[in-house]
Image: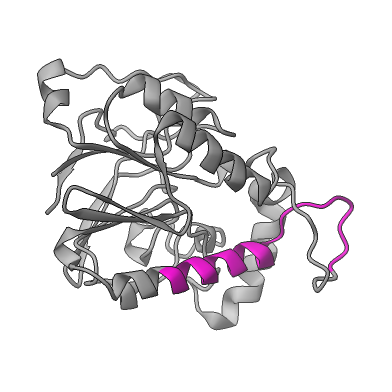
Amino acid sequence: MKLLVYSDLHLDLAPFRPRLDPHFLQTVDVVVLAGDTTEGTGGLRWARETFPGKPVIYVDGNHEFYSQHWDKHIDVMRKLASDYQVHYLENDAVVIGEVRFLGCTLWTDYALHGADEKLMAMNTARHRMSDYPRIKITRPAEMYWHERKHRLVPAMAGRRHDASRQWLQEQLGLGDPENTVVVTHHAPHPRSIPQGFEAHPLSPCYASDLEALMGKAGTWIHGHVHESQDYQVRGTRIVTNPRGYRRRGGGMQNSEFRVDFCVDVG
């Protein structure tokens, strides 16, 4: 099975219509969009209009949630995905042909630099990442932080990471690893952090160390880091093909982005 893989298209910042040879497109079995396609829900319509008749796997990135409600957005996406016949995955699995796809945003556990640095990483994220002031929430009764407005905080993102990680662990215990593909937005391994940024204080917002889950899926596709990656951990191939942001001087952030980037699975 041939997968056409994109992430971090950021269509709200720079429109994109892939120019693909029709004969090449006929060889593509599934399109995978690994998050940050655009803010809000518009990525679903774009996916269906751009790839008519093709199965599409779609997971949210952090940017899909901007100006949206943390929980209600997922409900809206599920409804729209059904209307557009797109496979929207948030702790969901779908089988296409003989390949099983597991998908979720994943978020992070903020522990990339170690458990002792986790609270510091969360505090840094809260003050320096755009996610938290731009995503709306309903404040859980058991959480008593003081906020001027009801906005996302790292503790809630960490909880959702934990739930997704547990779900993935359960699902990866089922089925054949060779025919299992995981799609997340946030990175599942430290090696996805671009060189030179490993110790950056915001890197825990981009990746978690899920090496214990490696080897249980043949392929793991992710986004969020705006740099192409392709490496193996314990038999799992981890790949990204992000477009990234538009540069001020012209062109896109990731010069290695490929409009025809495909992964063969199964």
The residue at 35%/18% (across/down) is: 17
Vertical arrangement, residue 86 with respect to residue 21, above or below: below
Tell me the quarter of the image containing the N terminus. Answer: top left
Q: Position of residue 152 (x, y in %)?
A: 72, 55
Q: Position of residue 29 (x, y in %)?
A: 18, 36
In the picture, residue 123 is in which quadrant?
bottom right
Q: Position of residue 137 (x, y in %)?
A: 75, 52
Vertical arrangement, residue 65 with respect to residue 121, above or below: above
Q: Is residue 37 visible?
A: no
Of residues 174 and 157, the one drawn nearer to the viewer in this rendering: 174
Residue 155 within the magenta-colored segment of the rendering = yes
Q: Is residue 7 visible?
A: yes
Q: Position of residue 15 (x, y in %)?
A: 45, 19
The residue at 85%/70% (across/down) is: 144
The residue at 44%/67% (across/down) is: 208
The residue at 19%/67% (across/down) is: 177
Of residues 231 and 136, the one drawn nearer to the viewer in this rendering: 136
Of residues 191 and 23, the one drawn nearer to the viewer in this rendering: 23
Residue 130 within the magenta-colored segment of the rendering = no
Tell me the quarter of the image containing the C terminus. Answer: bottom left
In the picture, residue 197 is in which quadrant?
bottom left
Residue 100 falls left or right of residue 81: left
Vertical arrangement, residue 129 with respect to residue 241, above or below: below
Dominant secondary structure (helix, strand or loop) of the stretch shown in magenta: helix
Q: How is the image coloured?
A: one colour
Residue 12 falls left or right of residue 73: left
Magenta highlight range? 145-167
